[in-house]
Amino acid sequence: MNTSNMGAGDGIYLDNNATTMIDPKVVEAMMPYLTTYYGNASSQHGFGAPIAKAIARAREQVADLIGAQYPDEIIFTSCASESDNTALWTALWTQKNKNEIVTTKLEHPAIIDTCSFLEARGVNVKYLSAMQNGSLDPKAFESLLTDKTALASIMWANNETGNIYPVEQLADIAAAHNVLFHSDAVQAVGKIAIDVKNTQVRMLSFSGHKLHAPKGVGALYVRRGTRFLPYLHGGHQERGRRAGTENVPYIVGLGVACELAKAHLDELNTRVRALRDKLEQGIVSTIPEVIVTGKDTDRTPNTLNVAFKFIEGEAILLMLNEYGIAASSGSACSSESLEPSHVMQAMGIPFSAAHGTIRFSLSRFTTEAEIDEVLRVLPGIIERLRELSPYWNLNKPKVINASHEFDPDSDERH
């Protein structure tokens, strides 16, 4: 197979936490707004009216998926990274007497890198440590909150491991301390049920291209009553909260994608989860010395992160690619680094395994035949790479345990 120019219908795509294919129904819904309806939503004439109506409908569809009480709590953005930046900055701008942010080292670079930028400019950023299985301790979270904390930002689900964090509980704790709570919910929206109106989450970010909408559109939920200052200036769009002419076709696409995601939520949590579990069970039963990261915690139904000891994840990806199989070794926004994933480091995964992590992320378009093919070729790939690995030959166990789960009492550390 020619793997240098792959697209729809080519190979096996198991990198859906990086991006997803656009659902054909989404493309169909977008087309009239790329061809026929080209007016500006701000215009008062007849060309603007259908555009404004389409944006309003999309806002309702997005609000419905996440359980927002009011459609006007949804602000359309270019992506989740913009939404995350907006949430962090507005929390600081609107609370001049507060100069602290609480977050974790498990977050997406959109949060971590922005916090680093803010730290260098005098903001006090506190990081909640993760436990070894990737979970978070609510009591430890509460201990970090002070009367100077402007915002707590904790992702709803991890992009690498699929770990689902106790966001509702953490948001309750934050509210009790008069602290705004934001969640980067990119990997949760459309995969698990979210009813944001019944939580203390004040702001929530997500991106269209992670749920079968196009790249270049995202959303920020801001609960009514939350003090807010815009991140972008120069226009009155989005009720003055985000300047710039609306990307109408993409906003329409996001709305339809959200409607479809809600309709397919049960399927994702049954059929797709079963496929993920089949892949996991097949790997641990045929390949020695592997760690399923975050296995003993609640995870999104589509995500499997496996650490293969004593080999490099990049080498595994290259060989999988030769078979037309696409997976990932970490966050798509930062996976060019040769360092172990910051998430694996934060979880305390042994160095011998942290370099060999592979994320398989499924979607509602994944088939059982595709999972069977991965299980057919992957054991041979791992065996060949380990034969070439001096680290494997030095550490090859004399007796291979039937259970390949990570021993949390092991002395092996970074």
Image (cartoon, rainbow, N blue to C red):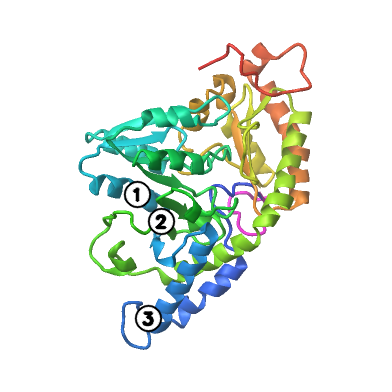
Q: Quadrant of residue 391?
A: top right
Q: Where are the magenta residues, as a range?
A: 1-12
Numbered mark located on residue 87 in the image: 1
Examine the rendering and report whether any part of residue 75 can be seen. no
Numbered mark located on residue 144 in the image: none
Examine the rendering and report whether any part of residue 78 can be seen. yes
Are the residues tagged 2 and 1 within 8 Å (C-beta)? yes
First reached walking from the N terminus: tag 2 or tag 1: 1
Mark 1, secondary structure of its residue: helix
Q: What distance separates the C-alpha of mark 1 from that of mark 3?
A: 30 Å
Crowding at mark 2 (Cα within 10 Å: few <14, some 14-19, many 20+): many
Say left or right for 260 vs 100: right
Q: Amino acid at mark 2?
A: Leu
Crowding at mark 1 (Cα within 10 Å: few <14, some 14-19, many 20+): many
Q: Quadrant of residue 290?
A: top right
282 and 157: which one is in front? 157
Q: Amino acid at mark 1?
A: Ala
Residue 294, percent across and down?
A: 61, 32
Say left or right for 26 vs 46: right
Residue at label 3?
A: 39
Say left or right for 408 vs 368: left
Q: What distance separates the C-alpha of mark 3 from that of mark 2?
A: 24 Å
Residue at label 2?
A: 220
Instruction: Tell which tag, 1 or 3, sits nearer the viewer.
Output: 1
Crowding at mark 3 (Cα within 10 Å: few <14, some 14-19, many 20+): some
Q: Amino acid at mark 3?
A: Gly
Residue 375, percent across and down?
A: 76, 39
